[in-house]
Amino acid sequence: MMGTTLALVAAAAFFAARYALSDNGNAVAQAPPAPAPQALEMIRRSEADKAKPKFIGDKNGFIFREPRDVPPPADCAGLTGGDKATDTQIAASPFNFSAAYLPPGMKEIFHTGNVCRGVVVAVTRSYSASPGAPITVMHIKNGPAVTANAPEERLQAITIAGRPAVLQTPIFEGDYVEILMKDSLGGYFTISGTQITPAELQKVAEAVK
């Protein structure tokens, strides 16, 4: 996320550069304007967050670990990768789902799934308005181990529709926000997006079935 933020700021500064005429009529590039104070504040917050240790431990039924310590779904053990699920396999899987609530104007724009040894181990659906940042929902046949991505101060143990969940709050307004939510099958959902408030994302999570 930090790399993306810096790249966007750098690109904006580059394309904002203006050309002026020198005394001899030749075009010379002026220095690009400094990033806006808001962009600088976003960078400052991102850098400060990056410097903090990622939370490793248990929170509300999820075990946060380093990426190397998160095992694959049991059906994928020993495999170098899975296969793409067909629509028929997704429709028949208990890990298929629907989102009964979406922010106004949003609709499904993409779905896919993963299969190991003939078993659907993940289903992903993305929703978006046009234009607009997407919301992505994944249903994963795995857990309770998950990848540690944030310091503990940005992780909140919550309950959504009676299900244990963890909310990863954004670094700044409009930044990436994610919900991990238990299911009734021994797996979990991830509901994530940008340019959406945690409260609105929780409404989406509440209606995922």
Image (spheres, rainbow, N blue to C red):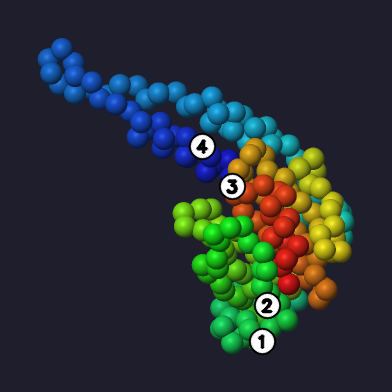
Residue at the location (65% across, 38% down)?
A: 172
Q: Which residue is mark 1?
A: 92
Using the image, determine if residue 8 lies above or below residue 112.
Answer: above
Question: In which quadrant is the C terminus drawn?
Answer: bottom right
Q: Position of residue 117 (x, y in %)?
A: 66, 85
* Nearest to N terminus: mark 4 or mark 3: 4
Query: Which of 43/163 is in front?
Result: 163
Task: Evaluate if marks 1 and 2 touch, with contact meaning CB atoms under 8 Å apart.
Answer: yes
Q: Which residue is mark 4?
A: 6
Q: Residue 12, percent across and down?
A: 41, 35
User: Within 10 Å of the Cα at label 2, are there few (<14), some (14-19), or many (20+) other Cα atoms?
Assistant: some
Q: Quarter-wise, where is residue 124 in the image?
A: bottom right
Give the position of the N terminus as an image quadrant: top right
Residue carrying label 3:
195
What is the distance, in whole Å, between disc 4 and disc 3 at their CAs? 18 Å
Q: Nearer the viewer, residue 95 or 62?
A: 95
Q: Position of residue 59 (x, y in %)?
A: 86, 53
Which is more N-terminal, label 4 or label 2? 4
Instruction: Kindly indicate the quadrant of the structure image that contains residue 90.
Output: bottom right
